[in-house]
Image: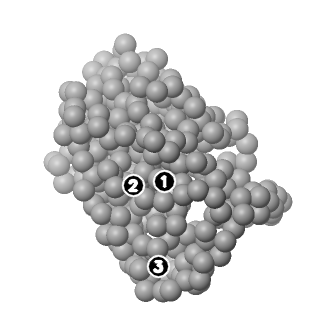
Amino acid sequence: MTALVTGASGFLGRALVRELLAGGHRVRALIRESGDASVLDRGVEVVRGDAMDPVALRRAVEGCPLVYHLAGVRRASDREAFLSVNAGSTRLLLAACLAGGAARQRFVLAGSLASMGPSRHGKREEEAFAPAEWYGESKAEAERIARSFADRLPVAVGRPPRIIGPGDRENLFFFRIVARGIALRILGPERPLSWIDVDDCARGFVLLGERPEAVGETFFLASRERTAFEQLQREVARALGVRPRTLPVPPAVLTGLAWAADAVSNTSGHRLPLNRKLARQLLAPGWTCCTDKAQRLLGFSAPTPLAESVARAARYYREHGLV
């Protein structure tokens, strides 16, 4: 079976491509004209085009009975930019699947815990969307769009929380801070986090494309082992072999720094690692989800320990001169 993967050159996309190939699938990757296809495994068919281009999408989905939509933006300067790409590309790709005449083409959408908003006690799939920022809002809208096609296409949605592992850039900021001998302690109560290793996450998405129980359903894909921002930094320090000093940060200071960072980013055009979106995530009471449904219906679990996932990420950063 040939599977199309949009966002194939991204962090999760590369891991998903590897898992699909290992499982005997043929893989087609939609890569932007400026994208680096060299990061993909050998044997992947590359189709050049943008996820917002209906013509390129029609060409990409042709002959693919399985479509994974991972392409999107995690950083943008305004709400409309998030919605335009993350929700808009979902509608365009679903329309391309229908226009191609593949009535039984399975469509797997990469959602996000961000669409459900913060929680200390674990969000469940059946709860209402409650995004706390624009990115989460755009992922919630992408899910609504996917569900609106469910009477015409087999649709499944996977919602990962924070993803960790080799090749990740979202968590690189924390590794760099710790590597410089600083561990941030945001004042206030501990804020629990759900997370998942990138390879475990990719295996979960493979199941969403293969298992009949996944059709019409949404699943949180996460480790049962929860962490917290401070614990994550301790694992990073252990993996890097450093002893950082703890720097207490009042929430108001973090918010102010994030506003200043966004102002610099918008003025210079150079995106700084700190931004208001990240600050809101860090100051939320927690980002947790329940894993029962994926275990019960798909037999899915994410066994990689946090320490192992962080250590693999640290090795990657060092090998590539990033820390």
Single out the mark in the foreground, 3 or 2. Answer: 2
Residue 140 picture location, percent across and down: 54, 31
Question: Circle 3 sits in a helix, a strand or a loop, which is it?
Answer: helix
Residue beneath disc 1 = 192
Residue 101 picture location, percent across and down: 34, 19
User: Is there a contact, CB below 8 Å, between mark 1 and mark 2?
Assistant: yes
User: Residue lying farthest top?
Assistant: 151
Point 67% across, 71% down: residue: 248
Task: Name the residue type under label 3.
Answer: Ala
Task: Name the residue type under label 2.
Answer: Arg
Residue beneath disc 3 = 237
Point 44% across, 21% down: residue: 147
Position of 290 relative to 278 (above/below): above
| Closer-to-camera residue (134/4) | 134
- Mark sitting on residue 226: 2
Cα separation between marks 3 and 2: 18 Å
Position of 93 relative to 242 (above/below): above
Single out the mark in the foreground, 3 or 1. Answer: 1
| Closer-to-camera residue (254/213) | 254
| Closer-to-camera residue (223/273) | 223
Point 43% across, 51% down: residue: 194
Q: Earlier in the sequence, mark 3 or mark 2?
A: 2
On the rendered structure, is 144 left or right of 124?
right
Question: Circle 1 sits in a helix, a strand or a loop, which is it?
Answer: strand
| Closer-to-camera residue (97/229) | 229
The colour scheme applied to this rendered structure is one colour
Residue 61 picture location, percent across and down: 37, 33
> Does the image show residue 102?
no
| Rendering quarter of residue 306 | bottom left
Point 47% across, 79% down: residue: 237
Task: Name the residue type under label 1.
Answer: Pro
